[in-house]
């Protein structure tokens, strides 16, 4: 799906799937130049400044899904993207409560307005990416550019990494997130 980029885009899509009992199994988000170029409504935008996000979400549908169910999901997602000022019930605490003690969140400044938020990937990921994405968007005003899962020698437990673009500084973002996620380790990528 293509959509204009704005903070909260991912959680509006993933939240629709979560509410219908689905788990997001994998996520790929790509930023691409808007093929329409500059805005046509009188706005002054630098060429290629306007971006589209190409979302590829693989999800596990419910057992009794049918063609009408898929159409309903599609319609719900488009409505959420068109009316992004509409409030959506906040169930992030309910989703994260069972895994909160094991998240071990870390925020890393990658430079040039980019940051990485990483946390342990829970055994069951139903709704977790959605809940964290919502917190990142609402508390930090972050645009999520990609989401990836990895495990390294430093982090033998699989980690989910959210790559963000933010306008605030590292410590401001960490303080805003701490209200919802508790103390967050911070660091700066020196590479």
Image: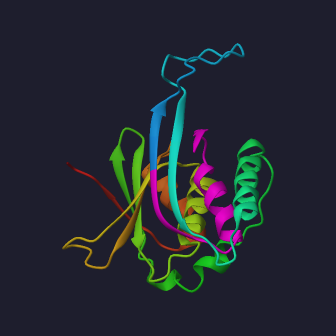
Residue 85: percent from the left, percent from the top?
78, 46
User: Could you tell me which residue is drawn at 81 percent across and 51 percent down?
Assistant: 86
User: The magenta stretch spans which residues?
Assistant: 1-28
User: Could you tell me which residue is drawn at 54 percent across and 66 percent down?
Assistant: 59
Residue 152 to residue 27: above or below: below
Q: Quadrant of residue 114?
A: top left
Asked whether 169 or 62 is in front, the reply is 62
Q: In the image, 89: left or right of 96?
A: right
Residue 77 to residue 65: above or below: above
Task: Report the number of discs.
Answer: 0
Q: In the image, 103: left or right of 97?
A: left
Q: Quadrant of residue 95?
A: bottom right
User: Could you tell me which residue is drawn at 41 percent across and 76 percent down?
Assistant: 104
Does the segment drawn in magenta span residue 27? yes
Residue 102: percent from the left, percent from the top?
44, 83
Residue 36: percent from the left, percent from the top?
57, 21
- In the picture, the quarter occupied by the N terminus is top right
Residue 43: percent from the left, percent from the top?
67, 16
Does the segment drawn in magenta span residue 3? yes
User: Could you tell me which residue is drawn at 70 percent across and 67 percent down?
Assistant: 66
Q: In the image, 73: left or right of 118?
A: right
* Farthest front residue in view: 67
Asked whether 170 or 137 is in front, the reply is 137
Colour scheme shown: rainbow
Q: In the image, 105: left or right of 69?
A: left
Asked whether 54 or 72 is in front, the reply is 72
Residue 34 to residue 90: above or below: above
């Amino acid at each position: 799906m293509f959509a204009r980029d704005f903070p909260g885009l991912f959680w509006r899509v993933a939240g629709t799937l979560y509410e219908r009992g689905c788990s997001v199994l994998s996520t790929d988000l790509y930023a691409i130049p808007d093929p329409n170029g500059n805005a046509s409504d009188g706005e002054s935008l630098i060429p290629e400044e306007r971006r589209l996000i190409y979302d590829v979400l693989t999800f596990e549908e419910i057992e009794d899904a049918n063609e009408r169910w898929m159409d309903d999901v599609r319609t719900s997602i488009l409505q959420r993207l068109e009316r992004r000022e509409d409030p959506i019930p906040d169930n992030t605490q309910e989703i994260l409560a069972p895994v909160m003690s094991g998240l071990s969140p870390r925020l890393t400044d990658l430079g040039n307005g980019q940051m990485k938020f990483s946390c342990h990937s829970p055994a069951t990921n139903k709704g977790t990416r959605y809940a964290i994405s919502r917190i990142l968007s609402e508390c930090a005003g972050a645009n999520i550019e990609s989401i990836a899962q990895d495990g390294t020698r430093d982090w033998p437990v699989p980690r989910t990494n959210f790559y963000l673009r933010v306008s605030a500084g590292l410590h401001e973002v960490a303080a805003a997130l701490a209200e919802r996620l508790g103390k967050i380790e911070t660091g700066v990528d020196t590479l």
